[in-house]
Image (cartoon, helix red, strand yellow):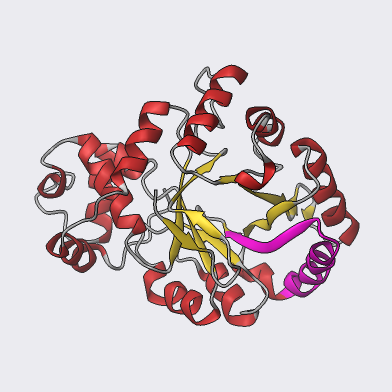
């Protein structure tokens, strides 16, 4: 396993990390039980994965993650969680909601602190209005030792060009230790502005879901290829994968991890076999020719899936 620094935090983070959200919802949607999750997490740790990303909104995932991590020494892994700033009746304006959210997460995770406390799915048009108040509360929680670092995450389905994360790094370059957004073959837009900002502000990038959906569904991929660039004969990137779907996924992970600004690529699989394959994929890299062709063909892509 390779490791990269999370911005200037000093943390060494595994190049592949584990996410408890996504379609499988930490195995809840795929029939994995507590014992299966414990085996999955143990195997991830054995292979060098050291960051686990979760959220209060992930349908009980924090509780399930705590169970799966039992028996493992706390300083052998990192936990990132998120609080939901958008509620049914509008965005959070009461600072007590943020404090209570973290305290409840700590209780569910059975830990005294998390390593990264993140705003979940911030939208660009609300950042200017709300960020200052949120930052003040989150920094107090950081000073109290309840979180080591602060982060903010993208709402991909709405903010496909990652304007919110770019704004966050531009306006508050020394506040956010990490930003989470998607960068992949069919979502290369962040390379235009977010990567330079992350580099200049020394902010770590957690690359979420770079392969999920688009690269695993040939018809969806063909649709996105046509939408964002040269569809190359409508062949679902056969030139890259040789028509092998598992090879395309492997190449997708390699592309997602290529930029040095990316700290880690998040995988949310509930399959140990797929986890092992995803980790093995990052032992290799694409050729210069492959990178060049993907970037020249789809450099303006901003797929929402």
Find residue 217 and report its image quarter. top left
Q: Is residue 215 rendered to the left or right of residue 94?
A: left
Residue in the image at 69% along x and 76% along y:
128
Provide the residue span drawn in magenta. 129-153
Residue in the image at 63% along x and 28% along y:
68
Residue in the image at 68% along x and 27% along y:
67
Find residue 235 and report its image quarter. top left
Tell me if residue 142 comes above or below residue 87 in the rendering: below
Residue 79 among those drawn in magenta: no
Across and down, in percent, residue 273 comes to 36, 27
Tell me if residue 125 comes above or below residue 305 in the rendering: below
Residue 186, visible in the rendered structure: no
The foreground one among 66 and 232 is: 66
Task: Please name the predominant secondary structure of the magenta segment in the image.
Answer: helix
The foreground one among 219 and 182 is: 182
Q: Is residue 249 rendered to the left or right of residue 113?
A: left
Across and down, in percent, residue 240 comes to 14, 49
The foreground one among 138 and 74 is: 74
Residue 26, visible in the rendered structure: yes
Across and down, in percent, residue 267 comes to 45, 42
Residue 139 among those drawn in magenta: yes
The foreground one among 248 and 35 is: 35
Find residue 275 and report its image quarter. top left
């Amino acid at each position: 396993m390779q490791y990269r620094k999370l911005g200037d935090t000093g943390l060494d983070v595994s190049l592949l990390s584990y996410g408890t959200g996504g379609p499988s919802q930490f195995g809840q949607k795929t029939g994995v039980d507590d014992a299966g999750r414990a085996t999955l997490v143990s195997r991830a740790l054995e292979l060098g994965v050291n960051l686990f990303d979760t959220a209060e909104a992930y349908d009980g995932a924090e509780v399930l993650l705590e169970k799966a991590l039992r028996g493992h020494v706390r300083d052998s892994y990192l936990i990132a969680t998120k609080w939901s700033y958008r509620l049914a009746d509008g965005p959070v304006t009461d600072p007590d909601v943020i404090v209570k959210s973290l305290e409840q997460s700590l209780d569910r995770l059975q830990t005294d602190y998390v390593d990264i406390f993140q705003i979940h799915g911030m939208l660009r048009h609300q950042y200017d209005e709300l960020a200052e108040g949120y930052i003040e509360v989150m920094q107090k929680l950081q000073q109290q030792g309840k979180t080591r670092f602060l982060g903010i995450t993208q709402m991909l389905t709405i903010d496909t060009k990652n304007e919110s994360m770019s704004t966050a790094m531009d306006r508050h370059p020394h506040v956010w230790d990490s930003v989470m957004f998607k960068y992949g073959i069919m979502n290369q837009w962040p390379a235009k502005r977010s990567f330079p900002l992350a580099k200049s502000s020394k902010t770590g990038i957690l690359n979420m879901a770079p392969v999920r959906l688009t690269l695993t569904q040939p018809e969806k991929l063909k649709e996105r290829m046509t939408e964002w660039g040269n569809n190359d004969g409508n062949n679902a990137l056969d030139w890259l994968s040789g028509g092998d779907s598992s090879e395309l996924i492997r190449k997708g992970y390699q592309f997602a991890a290529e930029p040095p600004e990316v700290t880690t690529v998040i995988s949310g699989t509930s399959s140990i076999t797929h986890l092992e394959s995803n980790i093995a994929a990052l032992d290799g890299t694409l050729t210069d020719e492959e990178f060049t062709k993907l970037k020249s063909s789809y450099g303006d892509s901003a797929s929402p899936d």
